[in-house]
Image: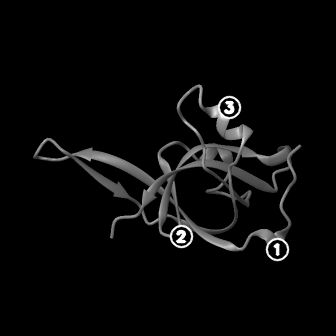
Amino acid sequence: MIRLPNSGELQRRIRLRLWADYPNATFAVDQKVDHGIERWAKVEPVYGLANRAGMQTGEMPTHLFWVRYAPGTRPEDLTANHVIEWNGHRYRVMDALNALDAQRFTRISAKDLGAIAQ
């Protein structure tokens, strides 16, 4: 069963950004991300069975991010075109859900894409 986080557990500052790829004149792709929004979050690495269950599709979430349910962080606002930046890494949003259908917290499953190039 899902346990909702306490307010005191939202201790990490993350940035949610919209990511888009655009073709350029040299037939390559330019990546652009918007300014995004900052939110306080609880960050949990994904272990064990959740990782093994994802092996069938080849897409495995590496982290869960819990944020307050609000405009910009509601599950219907988040798509696979969104990324999360936290702790020098970028994470691609895989899915998001309204935890316990309570409209208090959104749980975001994300995959680590690696360190952010400076």
- Mark 1 or mark 3: name the one nearer the start of the chain: 1
Q: Mark 3: which secondary structure?
A: helix
Judge left or right: residue 59 versus residue 63.
left
Report the quarter where the N terminus lies: top right
| Mark 3 residue crowding within 10 angstroms, few (<14) / some (14–19) / many (20+) | few
| Mark 1 residue crowding within 10 angstroms, few (<14) / some (14–19) / many (20+) | few
State the residue position of label 2. Answer: 87
State the residue position of label 3. Answer: 53
State the residue position of label 1. Answer: 8
Q: Nearer the viewer, residue 47 or 12?
A: 47
Check disc 3 and give the amino acid type: Ala
Q: Nearer the viewer, residue 92 or 77?
A: 92
Cα distance between the residues tagged 1 and 2: 19 Å
Q: Mark 2: which secondary structure?
A: loop
Q: Which numbered dot is residue 56?
A: none
Q: Position of residue 112 (x, y in %)?
A: 52, 52
What's the residue at 14%, 41% (across, down)?
Answer: 27
Check disc 2 and give the amino acid type: Asn
